[in-house]
Image (cartoon, coloured by chain):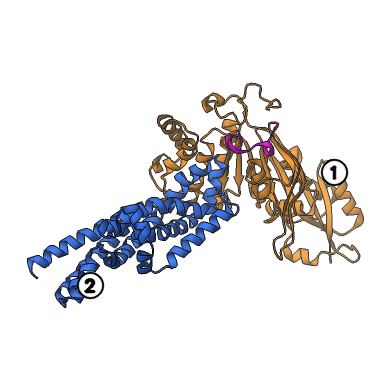
Amino acid sequence: MSPEIARLLVEALGQTLYMVAAAGLIGTALGLPLGVFLATSGRGELFEAVALNRVLGLIVNATRSTPFIILVVAIIPFTRLVAGTSIGTTAAIVPLTVAATPFIARIIEAAIREVDAGLIEASRAMGATPLQIVRKVLLPEALPAIVLGLTLTAVSLIGYSAMVGAVGGGGLGDLGIRFGYQRFMPEVMAAVVIVLIALVQAVQSLGDWIARRVNKRLRSA
Amino acid sequence: MNALTPFPDAVPLAAASSPPDQREDASRPHGAAIAFSGITKRFAATGAAAEVVALDDVTLDVAPGSITGIIGRSGAGKSTLLRTINGLDRPTAGTVRIDGLDVGALDGADLRALRREIGMIFQHFALLSSRTVFDNIALPLELAGMPRDEITQRVDELIELVGLTDKRGRYPAELSGGQKQRVGIARALATRPRVLLSDEATSALDPETTHSILALLKRINALTGVTIVLITHEMQVIKAICDRVAVIEAGRIIEAGDVYEVFARPQAETTRNFVASVTGAALPEAIAARLRPDPEGASQTVLRIVFTGENATAPVISRLSRSLDVDVTVLAGQVDAIAGKPFGNLIVAIPARPDVVDAVVALAGAHGLQAEVLGHVA
C-alpha cells in the first residue's frame, strides 16, 4: 500500500470518527429526553400526555422508516439551514443526527420500560417528584441497557456514515467506494473493510465493557 | 389542618419544612392514627371485563402506635386498602384520615410531603439494583433534599439498626432475601415516618427469615412508636406481631378487633379458617371425613376446647377424666402465645353420651373455657 493511500485511509478514519461521534453525541442529547418522554407519557404514567406521545411516536416511526440514503438527499435544505452548506463532512453530521435521534429515542424508551414498575411505585411512596423518579431511579436502573443500545447506535452510525459520500461527507465508506470500487483498487477496498471491522469490534467491546461495569444486577457474591 | 393530632407537640403531618430530627423521642410514641371511613374502590369496566368492586364501604380505625394486621386471601382488596393510606390508590368514595388529615384532599407537594411521613416496604423489596445498601437507604433522604453529611449519619444509624453494618457497600444482587428486606425496612424508616406500611413484606421469605424480619418490625415499633399497618395472607404473621387484626373478604371487613379476642372467638367462617391454620385447631382429615352432625348411633363425640387467658394453663383434661370418670382422647391441639398471652386449642373425643357431653361442656365452662361440639363419629 502506498503512503498516499495510507494517508487517505487515516484521513477517512478521522472523518468517520468525527461524524459518528458528533452525530452520536447530538443524537443522544436529543434522543434521551425524547425517549424518556415516550416511555413515561402513556396513559396513567408519570407525565401522562397521550396525544403528544402518539404524535411523537408517529414522527419517530416516519423518520425510522425512511431509507437513510433518501433521508440524506431529502433533507438537504434543512442541512443547508443548519450547517450553512449541504456538502462536506460537517454537513453530513446533520442527516446522521436526524437518523440517530429517533433510533436512540426508541432505545432509551425500551430500556426505561424494562425497569420494574415496582420501583416507580416505591419511589412514589417515598414522595419523589416525577422528575426525581426519572433522574434517580429510571435512568440509573436503565443504564446498562442504555449503554448497550448506544453501542448499537454507534455501530449503525458507522454503517450509515458510509453513505454520506453521496453528499461529499467523506469517511471510510466513501474512500472504499471511490478508490476501491470506482478506481479498481481492491487493496484499498480490503483495507477499508479491515479498518471498519476493527473499528466496529473496538466500539462493541468498549460498550460491552462499560455495560458490564455499570450493571450491578448479575454480580456474583 | 392537623388539629386532631393526639400528640400536641408532634410536628404536623405534611409540614415538609420541619426538620425530622425534632420528631424522634424514644420515650414518647409518635405513631399516627389512621381512620378509614366508608372506603369504596371501583375499577371501571374495560372491554369484556365487568366493573370490579375492590373495596366496599370499609370503615376501620387504626390506633396510634399499634401494629395492625389486615388479613385476606389474594384479591380480597387488602392491597388496595393499604395503598389508600399513602394515596397510591385513590378511593372512589370515602375518606382516609391520618391524625385527622384527609389524604384525599392532598395533591402535588402536599401529598409528597405526607408520603415522606409514611414508610412502605414491599413483598419484592423494590430496591434499586444500581445502588448499594447505603445508597438505597439514602434515596428517600436525597429526595427530601437532606444535606450529604446528615444523610451519611442517618443512614449509618439505620444500617446499624437493621444489622447490616458489614453489607454497607454491597449491591442488592449480593444479598439474601432477608437482608434485602432489612434494607427495605431501613429505607422506609429513613425519614422517621409516623406510619409504616408493609405490603406482604415476608411473603417471599422462608419461615426462619420471616421470623427475624417480624421480630425486627416489632422491635422498631417498640423503639419508635411508629404505627405499623401490614397486610398478609398468613395468620402466622398476625399471630407473631399484631395487636389488632381486621379480616377482609371480597372488599369488606368481616371481622376486626384485638388479636387475642379474634383468635379466641373467631366469628366469621373465613376467620375461623385463618385461625385454625395456625392454632393447631384443624381437625385431622381422617376424622373430619367421618364427622356427622347426628349423634344417633355414634360412639364418640368430638369437641373443641379453647383455653384462653389465665385458664389456658389449667390442667382441665386430667380434671375432666378424674371427676367425670371419662376417657378423653386428644385428637389435635397446641398451646401457644398470641399477642403475648397463652392460648391453647384442643380437639378431643369423648364417649357419645348426652349426659357426659353436657357434663364436660359444663365443667369446661366452670373453668372459664369454651367447649364446642364439632360433631360425632361412629
- What label does residue B103 carry, if any? none
State yes or no: residue B109 in magenta.
yes
- Tell me where residue A27 appears, x and y as whole percent: 37, 55
Residue B183's x, y, as percent? 48, 43
Please identify the quarter of the rendering in which residue A64 is found. bottom left
Colour given to chain A in the rendered image: blue
Q: CA distance from mark 2 to mark 1?
A: 102 Å
Which secondary structure lies at badge 1?
A: helix
The residue carrying mark 1 is B365
| Mark 2 lies on residue | A177
CB under 8 Å between discs 2 and 1: no
State the residue in front, A119 or B288: A119
Q: Chain of mark 1?
A: B
Mark 1: amino acid: Gly
Q: Position of residue B274 (x, y in %)?
A: 71, 53
- Dot 1: within a 10 Å radius of its alpha carbon, few (fewer than 14), some, or many (20 or more) residues? few
Callout 2, which amino acid?
Ile
Examine the structure image and report whether residue B2 is included in the region drawn in magenta: no
Residue plotted at (51% across, 61% down): A58
Which segment did they paint magenta? B99-113
Prevailing secondary structure class for the magenta stretch in the rendered image: helix
- Quick one: which chain is orange? B
x, y percent for residue B122? 56, 48
Q: Is residue B77 visible?
A: yes
